[in-house]
Amino acid sequence: MTQPDPIEALRALEQEALERISQADDPDALERVRVAYLGRKEGRVSEILRGLGQMPSDVRPRVGQEANRVKQEIEGALEVREGEVSTAVGGAFGDLTLPAREPWRGGIHPITQAVDEIWKIFRGLGFTRARGPEADTEWYNFEALNTPLDHPAADEQDTLYLVDSVLLRSHTSPVQMRTMERHEPPIRILAPGWVYRRDTYDATHTPAFMQIEGLVIDEGVTFVDFKATLAEFARRYWGPDTQVRFRPSFFPFTEPSAEIDVKRVITRPDGSREETDWLEIMGAGMVDPAVIENAGHDPERYTGWAFGMGAARIAMLKHGVGDLRTFFENDVRFLGQFAS
Ligand code: DAH
């Protein structure tokens, strides 16, 4: 039986492989051709190379040389064809006509931005930042602030109790007491923080929200300081034409108490100017002497004023956002508008 000439066999394989390569039109088809001819186990050219050792020594070098040439030829053709099929639209690199993907941009949450901006203004007015615990006692949250426990705010309907007399603070006002206990006046603090209430989650309520407390205690502090400082804050935050209104109100820890409204002047893109309605921004008042006394200071010597405002409310007014929930749903299409 005559063995087929190995050189002839190699050339036939080469023709066959090149033919299949030219017809392949996707990367998978090319991979199948590569495996069929050059694959380590079953590749037909590889098989001949493996059999070299059993060949008579006089033909071995020629067959070896030819087998390597054919192998290189096939590899070269595979590479060229791979380049052709993968650069076609819809090939291995996808649709090259698509616009590039934008790099990810992180940003500061709009509520945090509001806190930062408000903080910068109060820092400029001589305030220090303070904080207190989110889980606090009935004493700090209510009683020390002159609020008896039979007050509606202390009811389980409104406040989230953890155990007996420990609760999630329903406002940042307990930071007033905790600060006054530890520091001798003069005190000027701004205390932003999360507060919790048993509220339904809707367009104007969230069971957790960011509140910003302010407190000033010193000798000789009057209603004039109170009014002038908050009016100055409003003008720095919303612009020099902003008007401020103090409406009589009631809070157990202030006397007198006020709710503070602002009226802003908006400049339209065409240059015309328009006044907004009065918008409520905070509760405030002169600190009740009983509160100063509860903190261990002499209410005859010291007087002061305080306020509490919702950071999300300020951010809503600033950006014209109509639904509080959008701040908490973490939809990047919304939040991305505040990333600068
Ligand atoms: N703690 C009040 C609330 O959560 C807000 C407030 C009103 C804070 C008057 C004050 C204040 O410091 O003086 O509704």
Image (cartoon, helix red, strand yellow):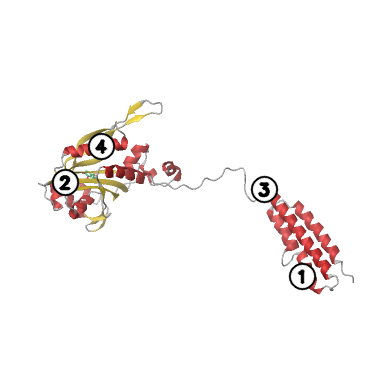
The kind of residue tagged 1 is Arg
* Residue at image mark 1: 50
Secondary structure at badge 3 equals helix
Residue 261, x across and y down, in percent: 26, 35
Work out whether mark 1 precedes mark 3 in sequence or the reverse, and give the earlier one: 1
Does any portion of residue 78 appear in the rendered image?
Answer: yes
Residue 107, x across and y down, in percent: 42, 46
Secondary structure at badge 1 equals helix
Direction from residue 194 to residue 333 in the image, left or right: right
Q: How many marks?
A: 4
Q: Which residue lies at the image location 31% right of the left edge and 47% below the top edge?
A: 210
Asked if 323 appears above or below 197 in the picture, the reply is: above
Q: Are marks 4 and 1 in contact (CB under 8 Å)?
A: no
Image region (quadrant) for ligand 1: top left
The answer to which image quadrant residue 254 occupies is top left
- Of tags 1 and 2, which is closer to the observer? 2
Q: CA distance from mark 1 to mark 3?
A: 35 Å
Asked if 222 appears above or below 37 in the picture, the reply is: above
Work out whether mark 2 precedes mark 3 in sequence or the reverse, and give the earlier one: 3
The answer to which image quadrant residue 239 occupies is top left
Q: Which residue lies at the image location 85% right of the left edge and 70% below the top edge?
A: 59
Q: CA distance from mark 2 to mark 3?
A: 75 Å
Direction from residue 155 to residue 36 in the image, left or right: right
The kind of residue tagged 4 is Glu
Work out whether mark 4 precedes mark 1 in sequence or the reverse, and give the earlier one: 1
* Residue at image mark 2: 218
Q: Which mark is residue 87?
A: 3
Work out whether mark 1 precedes mark 2 in sequence or the reverse, and give the earlier one: 1
* Residue at image mark 4: 232
Does any portion of residue 205 appear in the rendered image?
Answer: no
